[in-house]
Amino acid sequence: MLGDKIAKLGRILVIDDEPEITEIIKAYMSNAGYEVEVENQPQNGLGDAKNFKPNVIILDIQMPFMDGYEVCSQLRADPDTAETPVLFLTGKDAREDQGKAFGVGGDFYIKKPFSCERLLQMVKTIMLTSNKPA
């Protein structure tokens, strides 16, 4: 059953202020068998991370009101989300940005524009190597 497949593959939370990006990722990852929730307001994404309990969070850096660095820092400070893998997906490409992303607790970094297939492979790898159960 599809429900069983979703339960096996896991949950993904996408936090990005660009609705077209979140919808593309949601459609692609849902089609691959994952349960996906999207949030376009970074401050709401923090609550979603606690309530939805994703196995991985895909997070943009450049967002209004609260950037991805701050979101990731707050996720790491919360015992409920501290161990959830964070994959930064961003248009920022400077080494300093990558260093800062890892410095605030990010686990992976992919630059936009991105291939949905590459993103899917990264998510699969994260799910296989993460200690967070699906």
Image: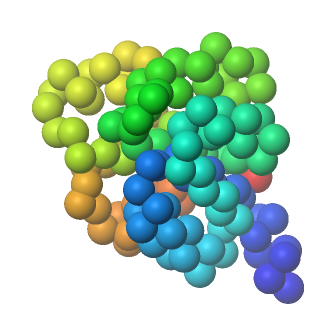
- Tell me which residue sits at (59%, 80%) in the image: 31
Which of 42/49 is in front? 42
Furthest-bottom residue in this view: 1
Furthest-left residue in this view: 94
- Tell me which residue sits at (39%, 38%) in the image: 63
Place of residue 128 in the rendered image (x, y in percent of width and height, measured from the top left): 60, 52
- Tell me which residue sits at (27%, 22%) in the image: 99
Furthest-front residue in this view: 65
Place of residue 2 in the rendered image (x, y in percent of width and height, measured from the top left): 80, 82
**Quadrant of the image for the N terminus?**
bottom right
Place of residue 82 in the rendered image (x, y in percent of width and height, measured from the top left): 66, 23
Query: In this image, 33 relative to 26: left or right?
Result: right
Query: In this image, 132 relative to 125: left or right?
Result: right
Q: Is residue 59 visible?
A: yes
Which of 20/129 is in front? 20
Number of marks in the rendered image: 0
In which quarter of the view is residue 129 placed? top right
Q: Is residue 121 visible?
A: no
Place of residue 60 in the rendered image (x, y in percent of width and height, measured from the top left): 40, 43
Query: In this image, 133 relative to 86: left or right?
Result: right
Query: In this image, 94 relative to 14: left or right?
Result: left
Which of 96/43 is in front? 43
In which quarter of the view is residue 112 placed? bottom left
Q: How is the image coloured?
A: rainbow
- Tell me which residue sits at (52%, 27%) in the image: 71
